[in-house]
Image (cartoon, rainbow, N blue to C red):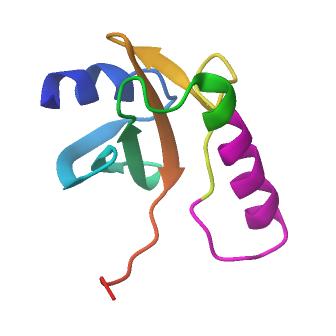
Amino acid sequence: MFQRAEQAAQLWPLTVNTLGLAAHRENAVFKLEAEEGTFALRLHRRGYRDSAELEAELAFMAMLASTGIAVPAPLRSRTGKHVESSSGQHASLLTWLSGRPL
């Protein structure tokens, strides 16, 4: 899974310094430290949601972030998409919000 995350990370215009697994539930979430900042790289569970559903979710999150609401904001890939496919799995990248489990 880590190799798939490394491959997916290359789809975004970042200079990656470190990549580590942060959570593995519905999605595998990796904390990605880059020269440009800290991000959450999500490898989405296969077959759970299609790219259109993920794009809709990320467009909504981008809209919320643009109004100043503190949500993880999606970043566009090198090809301008919020959702990419890597090794047959959907991937997305969002800004990292520090916090603690409730």
Residue under the image location 35 percent in, 33 percent down: 45
- In this rendering, the answer to whether 82 lies above or below 71 is above
For this orientation, the residue located farthest to the front is 48
Residue under the image location 73 percent in, 76 percent down: 69
Residue under the image location 39 percent in, 76 percent down: 98
For this orientation, the residue located farthest to the bottom is 102
Q: Is residue 11 left or right of residue 27?
A: right
Q: Quadrant of residue 38?
A: bottom left
Residue 71 forms part of the magenta stretch:
yes
Residue 13, percent from left and from top:
52, 29
Q: Quadrant of the C terminus?
A: bottom left
Residue 43, percent from left and from top:
35, 34
Residue under the image location 69 percent in, 26 percent down: 52
Range covered by the magenta-colored residues: 55-72
- In this rendering, the answer to whether 64 lies above or below 16 is below
Residue 15, percent from left and from top:
38, 35
For this orientation, the residue located farthest to the top is 87
Residue 13 forms part of the magenta stretch:
no
Q: Quadrant of the N terminus?
A: top left
Residue 64, percent from left and from top:
77, 65
